Image: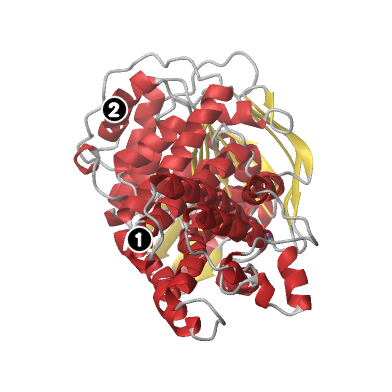
Amino acid sequence: MSVRPDAPPAPAVTGPPAIRARGLTKRYPDVTAVDGLDLSVAAGESFGFLGPNGAGKSTTIAMLCTLAVPTAGTVEIDGHDTRTDAVAARRSIGLIFQESTLDGELTAAENLRFHADLYDIPVALVPGRVDETLALVGLSDARDRFVRTFSGGMRRRLEIARALLHRPRILFMDEPTIGLDPQSRAQVWRYLHRIRERETVTLFLTTHYLDEAEQCDRVAILDAGRIVAQGSPAELKAVLGADRVDLRTDDDAAAARLLRTRFGLTVAEAPDGLSFTATDSARILPRLFAELDVPVYEARVTPPTLDDVFLHHTGHRIRAEGPADPSGDDAPPPVPAPRPAPEVASGGVRAELRALRMVWRREMLHFLRDRAGTVISLFQPLLFLFILGVGLAGLMAGPSSRSYQVFLFSGALVTASQAPALRVGSALLWDRRSGFLREMLAGPVHRGTLLLGTCLGGTTVATCQAGLLLGAGAVIGVPPDPGLLVLLAAELALTALAMTVLGVLLAMFVRPQTYGTALTVLMAPLMFLSGSVFPLSAMPGWMEAVALVNPFTYAVDAMHRTMAVYLTDAPASLFAPVAWGSWHPPVVLEALLPAGLAALGLMWAARRFSRLD
Ligand SMILES: Nc1ncnc2c1ncn2[C@@H]1O[C@H](COP(=O)(O)OP(=O)(O)OP(=O)(O)O)[C@@H](O)[C@H]1O
């Protein structure tokens, strides 16, 4: 293992610590992942968290970054208590997660622009900042490529660029080089050193690579959720003092006897040689060679490593070292001249609105790029209209096949909006699984804003998609009156909002693998019992009673009543309004009911969302 000799020294530190944790604890039902941890990291310091798999490193970083709620203890980031001032704390933080958290369906530049909006970087600075950070990590040529086409190393470099985009005061990195080849690893470290040369950034990284920990100003050794030792790498190793000496001789037994009797050493004998530890190996070895009258084939002196320190404190060894020296010597990428960091954005309503627009825009980009999905989603309502509409018309007493198709049109519109609206819930689950959700949750905006933006995005997509079907209405006899189309589109948008929120709410409670089934079980009765396939008057009493408490009944009824105004021959058997006894709820109330319920559902979902670990 070699240690990079030119790692920048820790800058002189004044003021409050960048990171302070007291009694930090995280208990899961089966395990205490982090157990009463105290630590303090000075501004500008590089601090390494070294520990084997499962030691609690990621859980600690998640709590420090406000992404997990501690079971006990407190955290202050840049002076902000994360319990009471999480959004302000997040503004000081840049975060590189262990797993990739990029959106593969966006380009490299789009991923950065998303981040710029999330962190409210002044709009005028964004293009320059995007160019600068892409150049810093050598990705200028890949700026317009979709991230799904990137290699693992390119993704990691883009994540570093993204974490630095808003000039954070503290950069958290959870195993920043895990899974990278030696060359990419070396590059990552070069970028990190360069960043520290440019500006005062506190680095907090977790690793189980010893050579990476060696490059930190201070290291905490973590085992089973507790810090067992902390200090500079040199201080930690100085506690051990002794070097390890490995010898291979022509007669190991004779050499071992001499070492024990003449030098008083404890010697371990193995088939491939001897080993012992000595505090003064430089003095012992020449004497040993002089006094030993057997040939020595090999003598190797190894100064204590952090792995030895780990062994000393825990009784077991940490896992492997890194695959290669991270101080590799490739040609460095071009680095722009240092620029003074602008003030950190101060948040507020404008920043929340900007984040909301950005989340909405991402939904739209996904929609516009998924043409196949759009076409496929239209199949179901078209089948609804042209197969169900023709096939069942004969069974419906009275109305012609044509008027039954017109009756089905509202249901077809709702069905057309259903797939994209409900896809938002599954996209949220997908974002959670792919890691992108963590990028959003780590941003300095309220989680309710993110959820609202997502729902509005889903609603817009659903309305646009169902809007495509609106054009087909004329084919089956829906009057092509602009007034009617506008009213139907507005009613549809309110219904789509309710469906989007329903999908999002469901996504808060079920696992990804259960979502599809749960949705079918939920939506099928809601749609069949909404008066969209057959009127309430054709239902038996119990079924009608159920339909009357189904909110979608009123959404569909509002559309039917709106259409009836524009139809000259709307049969009363199909288009009779919903009635509670002799009272017909006003159309406006019916149309607004789904939106009102959506608002309540959104509040509930936001509560769940804000508690998401
Ligand atoms: N959401 C969770 N639910 C239950 N247990 C968890 C959860 N997250 C982590 N743990 C447990 O907490 C302990 C610490 O996990 P953590 O991921 O923090 O370790 P780590 O040091 O980061 O490991 P690695 O190096 O593998 O990433 C482990 O025993 C893990 O199984």
- Looking at the image, tell me whether mark 2 or mark 1 is earlier in sequence order: 2
Q: Quadrant of ligand 1?
A: bottom right
Give the Cα separation between the discs numbered 2 and 1. 53 Å
Residue 540 visible in the current orientation: yes
- Is 349 in front, or is 388? 388
Q: Which element carries disc 1, helix, strand or loop? A: helix
Q: Which residue is mark 2?
A: 132
Residue 276 visible in the current orientation: no
Residue under the point 62% across and 35% down: 446
User: Label 2: few (<14), some or many (≥20) within 10 Å?
Assistant: some
Answer left or right for 2 relative to 40: left
Answer left or right for 118 relative to 585: left
Q: Is residue 454 above or below residue 116?
A: below
- In percent of width and height, residue 526 lies at 64, 68
- Is 574 in front, or is 244? 574
Say which amino acid is labelled 1. Answer: Ala
Count of numbered circles in the view: 2
Q: Which residue is mark 1?
A: 474
Q: Is mark 2 within 8 Å of ligand 1?
A: no
Image quarter for residue 191?
top left
Image quarter for residue 204?
top right
Say which amino acid is labelled 2. Answer: Glu
